[in-house]
Image (cartoon, rainbow, N blue to C red):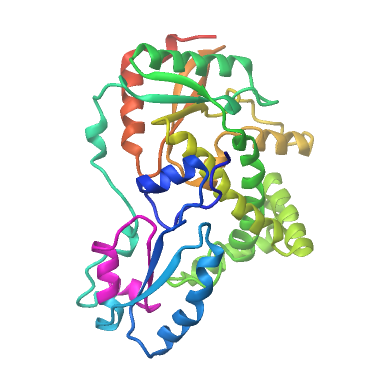
């Protein structure tokens, strides 16, 4: 079965969500989603919510039942405090609060008992993971992370030796296939190229329609690239040209499609991570390369910039935590191994990385 293409509304995933994805079932079938409204019944916010709610569930896999609950008080602070401290973090509660409420702590408004920077986050005492053992960990070696057209055989060999070292340390190490990984670079490309053009360049690094501090002097300084575009790198020039072409001709269609596919990509990794604690693959498919000649062919420069990305770019899209470790040498150059973990589970990554580093001298591993 194919994994469910839609990620839940909040992280981390609960057990029923992970199981639903593993079995390929719509995550919200037979479930109820509560809309917690920070206004009482009869006002404008309530009118919007009640007009929208009957149709909202039809657009979520599993067609959950939508229930509107009212929690007025404190200009929205009561509901926001409840969402931060009490609400279940399993994808079944959505907060509909006054637009100014999330910024209450910034303005030191009395009664704001939440930190908007930490909404939906799960933290850990990460240093406690150090000094542990890799024994008992289950590690999936991602088949599609090896053998790219630009991959160097010595890099693949060194990373596979690193996987074998984990087996010596008591971990269960198995090959796992995630075909979606090979599509990850294409998904990232549409998001990165069109997004960078619109947000970073045309939007002067700030973009539009978000609440917060806009540093006007920084906006002005960034906007000056238009008078100095000849100084931009060839890779950035290519990004802008491609991005502008796609935005003008397709008007964001492929950016939107890539964002939708990003959920399928993330679900594919989550399906594998339901079985394994960590995924493992080369960080880059090759060792450090020589800098291209600035006066050389433009395509040499562009190819050199993008040839290193097929394994790392997909996780820029999905947000899975990852770490890179040097795992061996070839002709005086290091190769890197990447380990990827579940969302909010960086501690397992640190535990495995620390155990690996302390187990041997990676510089003596050669290919």
Residue drawn at 61 percent across, 41 percent down = 184
Residue drawn at 33 percent across, 56 percent down = 89
Relative to 212, say whether 143 is above or below. Answer: above
The stretch drawn in magenta includes residue 367: no
Comparing 327 with 3, the one in front is: 3
What stretch of residues is rendered in magenta? Answer: 78-106
Relative to 222, say whether 272 is above or below. Answer: above
The quarter of the rendered structure image containing the C terminus is: top right
Comparing 351 with 32, the one in front is: 32
The quarter of the rendered structure image containing the N terminus is: top right
Residue 146, x across and y down, in percent:
60, 24
Is residue 309 visible in this depiction of the protein? no
Give the side of residue 367 with respect to residue 46, left or right: right
Residue drawn at 45 percent across, 42 percent down = 320
Extreme residue toward the bottom, this view: 42
Give the side of residue 305 with respect to residue 120, left or right: right
Is residue 62 visible in this depiction of the protein? yes
Comparing 341 with 354, the one in front is: 341
Residue 362, x across and y down, in percent:
41, 14
Q: Quadrant of residue 93?
A: bottom left
The stretch drawn in magenta includes residue 94: yes
Relative to 345, say whether 292 is above or below. Answer: above
Residue 67, x across and y down, in percent:
39, 72
């Amino acid at each position: 079965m194919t994994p469910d293409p839609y990620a839940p509304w909040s992280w981390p995933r609960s057990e029923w969500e992970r199981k639903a994805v593993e079995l390929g079932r719509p995550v919200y079938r037979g479930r109820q989603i509560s809309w917690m409204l920070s206004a009482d019944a009869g006002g404008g916010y309530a009118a919007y919510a009640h007009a929208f709610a009957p149709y909202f569930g039809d657009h979520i896999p599993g067609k959950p039942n939508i229930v509107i609950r009212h929690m007025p008080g404190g200009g929205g602070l009561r509901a926001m405090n409840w969402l931060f401290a009490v609400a279940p973090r399993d994808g079944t509660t959505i907060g509909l609060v006054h637009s100014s409420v999330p910024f209450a702590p910034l303005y030191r408004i009395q009664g704001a008992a939440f930190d908007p920077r930490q909404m939906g986050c799960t933290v850990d005492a990460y240093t406690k993971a150090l000094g542990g053992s890799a024994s008992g960990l289950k590690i999936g070696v991602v088949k599609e992370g090896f053998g790219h057209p630009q991959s160097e055989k010595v890099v693949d060999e060194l990373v596979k030796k690193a996987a074998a070292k984990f087996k010596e340390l008591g971990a269960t190490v198995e090959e796992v296939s995630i075909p979606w990984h090979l599509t990850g670079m294409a998904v990232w490309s549409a998001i990165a190229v069109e997004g960078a053009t619109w947000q970073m360049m045309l939007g002067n690094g700030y973009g539009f329609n978000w609440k917060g501090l806009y540093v006007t002097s920084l906006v002005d300084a960034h906007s000056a690239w238009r008078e100095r575009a000849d100084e931009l790198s060839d890779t950035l020039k290519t990004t802008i040209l491609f991005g502008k072409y796609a935005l003008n001709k397709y008007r964001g269609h492929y950016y939107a499609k890539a964002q939708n596919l990003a959920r399928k990509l993330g679900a594919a990794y989550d399906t594998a991570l339901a079985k394994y604690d960590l995924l493992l693959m080369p960080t880059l498919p090759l060792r450090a390369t020589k800098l291209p000649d600035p006066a050389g062919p433009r395509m040499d420069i562009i190819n050199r910039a993008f040839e290193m990305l097929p394994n790392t770019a997909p996780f820029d899209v999905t947000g899975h935590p990852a770490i890179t470790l040097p795992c061996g040498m070839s002709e005086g150059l290091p190769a890197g191994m990447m380990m990827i973990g579940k969302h909010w589970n960086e501690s397992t990554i640190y535990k495995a990385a620390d155990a690996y580093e302390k187990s041997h001298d990676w510089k003596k591993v050669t290919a």
